[in-house]
Image (spheres, grey):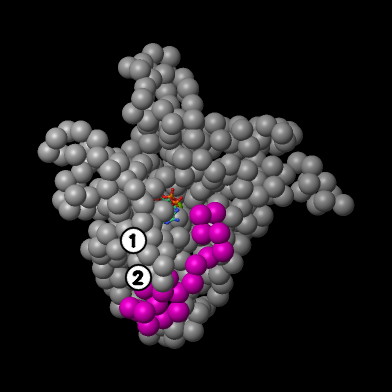
Amino acid sequence: MTKFFTQSFFSNDIGIDLGTTNTLVYVRGKGVIRNEPTVVAVNVKTNQLVAVGHEAKKMLGKTPPHIRTVQPLSHGVISDFEITQELLEYVIHKAQEERTRMFGPRVVIGVPTGVTNVESRAVRDAAVAAGAREVHIVEEPIAGAVGSKLPIHEAFGTMVLDIGGGTCDIAVLSLNGSVASKSSHIAGDRFNENIIDYIRSEFRLLVGERTAEEIKIGVGSALPLPEPLERAVRGRDLATGLPREIIITDTHVRESLSVSLDGLLDALKEVIEQTPPELLSDILERGVVVFGGGALLRGLPELLEKMLGVPVRISPDPLTAVARGTGIITETPELFKEIFLHEEEILSQT
Ligand SMILES: Nc1ncnc2c1ncn2[C@@H]1O[C@H](COP(=O)(O)OP(=O)(O)OP(=O)(O)O)[C@@H](O)[C@H]1O
Ligand SMILES: [Mg+2]
């Protein structure tokens, strides 16, 4: 009975996926309650937050001088500490709004693997400042493995590939630890840059990053498609400076991504080469599990499977795997001690 009361009335535990591109918040019993771009708009005169998430992303490139839009995480590292702290405090307060504030929440935060100790401490301090009574920091690919319900506690080789916006993480996990891993910047943002560069050199047309992302999601693929896809794209003609429209097909996008996809394959092969032979048989049996937004690129699992000769499957709902994993960890953090970046528990002053 006591357990029931503590869990249903007072527990307001929060899991956060602090991604380079998207920040997701998971509350136990409710699921993912927030899924927004990791973008913040700040008034530089008053130092106050003006907008967060979708609202702030809409302002990118359109603000008056006293408002600054910031993407506080870039290329998988925290490039703006203070703003990251403000963002975390904001999302933790929001997540608690409808809940009792009698006890501070337990918060589990997934961070990109590239973050330094100093950065992860800053993340932890921000959560404490926002009222958390207990904070745990975990690397995104491990949280994603938990969210994908993979047996990371077992003496069994589990291979994951997390293709986010800023970073791509590959890891072979066994007994709560990473046996082999590699992190690179071949991820969603790089794919967008590849598309921009390709259109510039092949069509002499300049397109923006948002357009490139729409092209990638709309007609992008890693393998030829049964039904070709195409879309009209508008940009600035490099010679005349005037607007022009072209048609982009899935073949164009595939060509533009080919170098990155080769790089991704090489990185996967490298991790497989580092993996002890005993664990390789587990990987051959269960395969590689892919999550992060990049997992949604058409034909990617098929391409990887063909080139690596191991089964490849996409985690169900790959964009929320990390957030769901952080949520699962809040339920029984004692089972995940070994994977936390800081093992000590942080107790608030009260
Ligand atoms: N259908 C799709 N096809 C291809 N790419 C997609 C698709 N949907 C989303 N993406 C890409 O996924 C990326 C965002 O993924 P995700 O939210 O997992 O990143 P993140 O966790 O914020 O970043 P990181 O893990 O690097 O910190 C973006 O680059 C986006 O363009
Ligand atoms: Mg991520």
The residue that label 2 is drawn on is: 224
Whether residue 173 is visible, yes or no, is no
Q: Nearer the viewer, residue 1 or 302?
A: 302
First in sequence, mark 2 or 1: give its number: 2
Q: Is residue 256 left or right of residue 162?
A: left
Between 214 and 282, the residue placed more toward the observer is 214
Tell me if residue 284 comes above or below residue 251 in the rendering: below
Q: Give, as a single range, the part of the protein colored magenta.
A: 299-320
Q: Residues within 10 Å of mark 2 (few under 14, many from 20)?
A: some
Give the amino acid at mark 1.
Asp
Q: Position of residue 82 (x, y in %)?
A: 40, 30
Q: Is residue 294 left or right of residue 346?
A: left
The residues bearing labels 2 and 1 have C-alpha atoms spaced at a distance of 8 Å
Q: Which residue is mark 1?
A: 250
Nearest the camera: 179 or 164? 164
Taking 174 as reference, is 219 above or below it?
above
